Image (spheres, helix red, strand yellow):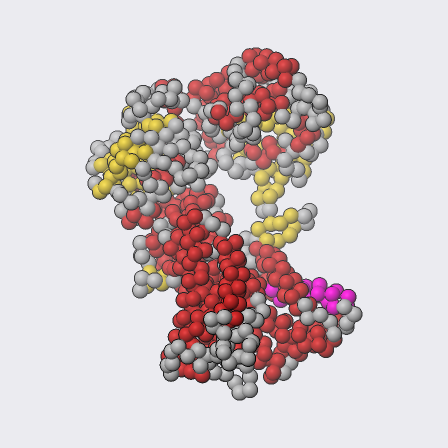
Amino acid sequence: MQLEVRTNTPFWLVLFAPLFAMIVALSLCSVLIIWADAPVFTAYGALLNGGLGSRFAIMETLSRSIPLIFTGLAVAVAFRSKFYNIGCEGQLYCGALAAVYIGSGMITLPPIAMIPLLMLCGVIAGGLLLIVPVLLKTHLKVDEVVTTLLLNFIVLLMVSYLIEGPMKDPASLGWPQTASIIDEGVFPPLFEKSRVHLGLIFALIAAVITWIVMRFTTFGYASRAVGLNLQASNFFGIPVNMTIIKVSLISGGLAGLAGVSEVAGLKGYLTLDLSPGFGYTGIVVAMLAQLNPIGVVISAFFISVVYVGADSMSRVLNIPAYLADVIVGVSVLCVLVSVMFTQYRLRFK
Amino acid sequence: MPVLELNNISKRFGNLLANENISLALDAGEIVALLGENGAGKTTLMNILFGHYSADEGWIKVNGEILPNHTEAAINAGIGMVHQHFTLADNLSVMENIVLGTESLFAWRQDRAKASKRLENLSHEFGLEIDAQKQVSELTVGERQRVEILKAIYRDVKILILDEPTAVLTPQETEKLFSSLKDLSKKGLTIIFITHKLHEILSVTDRVAVLRRGKLVGEVLTKEADKNILSEMMVGHKVSYPSKKNQQYGDIVVELDNISTVGEKGESSVQLHNITLQVRSHQILGIVGVSGNGQLQLARLLSGMIQHNSGTMNLFGNTIEKNSPLSMIRQGVARIPEDRHTEGIVGEMKLWENLIGERLSLNQMTHFGCCIDKKSAIQHSEQLIDDFDIRCSGTNAQANLLSGGNIQKLILARTLTQNPGFIVANQPVRGLDEGSIAYVQTQLMDARNRGAGILLISTDIDELLTMCDDLMVMCDGYISKVFKAESKSISEIGLMMAGQLGTDNTSIN
């Protein structure tokens, strides 16, 4: 049995490979559901129902997918250039921190200016956090996986200090949280009685812009070339280091936006549980989307369905909600394998 | 009874039939050349023999017995292989390398005295002199090869396979190797000699087996063959190479004066020492030398990939202070890198994207200075595919799916279409088939006739003698004076390659 490169890939295969992968993934996970002593089809039904089955479910899923689109884009942009930014979680908190700092009374502007200002601050804060890791990488060849990952913990501890100390809201009755963002800075909800806010529009716009930049500009070309072959890119005259620095700033900025939209669209103030690991889930979102910005939107939505649906599945059938993590993990593996089969075929001897 | 018998060997890699029904029989004491172009299936066949690969069909007999398909069996049957890339441990001595693997792991002590006596006898007998106590890292490439051969003979091999053994040798070292091989064959050793160099075959072998596209296309006795017969058997048709007509040189395009480089920390490649050279318009200057003697750094310097540490570098009359790939591209330098796959192309990108790589850096083929003008990029690429006869499925073909020759055409297309004033070509025909070699050489010759100055680096003296107007020899990062290609004999050049550059600043040898 051996793998063989496909010289051309039929279109139907590209289309159905991820679908087939999902079916395989769900079949594999049904073993766990049976193990948890629950009926498989009822369980998946509950999951689907909880994620998509009602207006409330859809709204929950959409609002959950907003930060995932941002962090997914952040990862997709960076990974394209082989800049392994594992620090989206930290950049997300930095963005949120900047939004709360500027937006909780320091400056008051009408919403039309206030919202862009907060977003700009979030982008800058998220990007700035990556400056040190990227310069360490380009100038001293320090591995960015280590530096960006460890920065997450530093940022979280710093946020913890700030919300217990200097930035603690005196009116919070002792809870460790910051003051709320003023009304002018809050992202208005898109639909009545739902938690889906303006951030969704921004996330979709960000995805389209990222796609355009990656696909049609010389910068997109350079950032792809740098990721695929650093030496040849250098030989082509592409400013390799500058490209990586720009990519990292964009990546950090997008992750920062996730923080801004969560804090200004959903929570209103900053606490330590702002993100249940959106930064890390962003990696999964991007991998599932094959680092394609438009794919990120779809995969973020899918992952949100699974997470939101799994919550209600676990309530209905009394099985652990952690199953959502397993489903997402297995799906990513299956999709990666199926993508391999669009490029290779198996030949049996 | 033949010592070695290959019967109907076939091997398939994916869609590629690397070996097709190859049958070959060898007698004791024979030196047989396995001739073929790159990709003809020579190395695959030998790897099957040595047990690295398993054949899809066919069988191998050694002394009448079927050879099981694994390396250990091949070694036990007395098959030894000297690979193109040596397999020696740098941090061990010659002695240790040779006995490595011949002693039991559970032996209480090593019988060094006996081993070294045996080694001494062997090296004496076959003229393979070597200091057995030296560390391998201190040896020259020629000496390392001797260690590889000794390693094989030490194990009492009956069949010795040499894969392109002369690629890393000076002409003198090659002579020495050949006389050792003749001695070995007189003792009854069967030698298989893999090569694509015709004159080597004529001087050392008894019989030639020619492979083309995985098939055995013929066997001839060496005494009945000549270069033309062999070349036609190998390629399958007549190949016409460019001819060199003398031309009046023009202005100086590149001038290096006393250039030295210092590598980055931990870099292992040989650095440049006091390099002085000139390339003029209408001139092809060849750099001769055994691979790994500073040619890479010279090419990288002229490609803008590294900085010089001292000395001055002039390009078209302007002094270069800060060297970079972009500045070289801006000034119209065509660069053909040694390693096509790692520097020449971004393999996963499309053909058209590779063809406009340098153009984009110059901000050409763009809209508003930031977006790719895909329409003109595609048109441009289609034109180049036509002009340079790049065989591909279209502009959207993935670059690394092209053959070596077509990748080289892609690189030529990208650089030569700009009508460059200076071309630096590092081993532009290495690993290509004869048809592509002729094509690349013709393109370079045409560029020279149009007025480009060319610096051509190669390890193949024959190639340089046919292409170049003038030659310089590099050894250990130093360079000789320039001389006319016709003015020195091959053996004189060989001595220079070994370090006798005849200049003041070479302290070696």
Q: x, y (%) of residue B405? A: 44, 42
Chief SS of the magenta region: helix
In-front residue for pair A324/B209: A324
Magenta range: A18-35
Q: x, y (%) of residue B477? A: 37, 30
Q: Quadrant of residue B10?
A: top right
Whether residue B304 is in magenta: the answer is no
In-front residue for pair B278/A203: A203
Furthest residue toward bottom: A192
Is residue B180 among the parts visible in the rendering?
Answer: no
Q: Quadrant of residue B446?
A: top left
Q: In this view, does B366 lie above or below B155?
A: below
In-front residue for pair A191/B367: A191
Tell me the quadrant of the picture where the N terminus of chain B can be found.
top right
In-front residue for pair B339/B215: B339
Is B300 left, or right, of B126 in this rendering?
left
Is A64 left, or right, of B292 in this rendering?
right
Residue at 43% across / 31% down in the picture? B291
Q: x, y (%) of residue B459? A: 41, 30
Residue at 43% across / 73% down in the picture? A101
Is residue A4 among the parts visible in the rendering?
Answer: yes
Residue at 27% across / 35% down in the picture? B311
Tell me the quadrant of the picture where the C terminus of chain B can be found.
top left
Is B304 left, or right, of B84 in this rendering?
left
Whether residue A19 is in magenta: the answer is yes
